[in-house]
Image: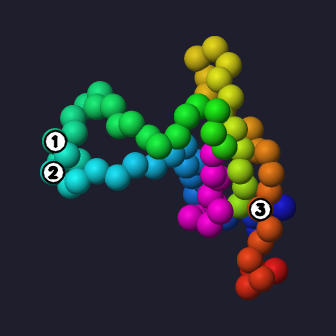
Amino acid sequence: MGTFDKVSVDITVVLGSTSMPIHQVLRLGRGAIIELEASEDDAVQILANNLPVATGTVVVNGNRIAVEVGALLPRPLDMR
């Protein structure tokens, strides 16, 4: 396992997305709320190094937020 100790993987969870003009982005301040085109019950996309690897759901337990992996996505043919 020693060889894998230094492998770095960036994990990203996509909760939703939206579009807005750049002038609105530039006016955003601390505490700004951006409405997403998704609800809390929608599936989230899980990315590893910007590649989709799974889908899941958001789980809230008290003041902690987690993502539960629901399904792994098939790997692209060039990564097998």
Range of magenta residues: 44-52
Check disc 2 and report its element: helix, strand or loop.
Answer: helix
Is disc 3 placed on a helix, strand or loop? loop
Q: Which residue is mark 3?
A: 73
Q: Would you name the residue on which mark 1 appears?
A: 27
Taking the view exactly as shown, the residue that stands out farthest to the top is 62
Q: Nearer the N terminus, badge 3 or badge 1?
A: 1
38 over 3 or under it: above or below: above
Q: Callout 3, which amino acid?
A: Leu
Where residue 74 sits, quadrant-wise, is bottom right
Q: Is residue 77 left or right of residue 14?
A: right
Q: Identify residue for label 2.
A: 23
Residue placed at 80% from the left, 51% from the top? Answer: 71
Image position, residue 6 (x, y; %): 66, 62
Residue pictured at 68% horizontal, 29% vertical: 59
Residue furthest to the bottom: 78
Crowd rating for badge 2 (residues with CA inside 10 Å; few <14, some 14–19, many 20+): few
Does 30 appear above or below 17?
above
Say left or right for 11 vs 75.
Answer: left
Type of amino acid under label 1:
Arg
State how far apart marks 3 and 1 are (Cα): 37 Å
Residue 17 drawn above or below residue 60:
below
In front: 9, or 61?
Answer: 61
Assign the magenta stretch its main secondary structure: strand
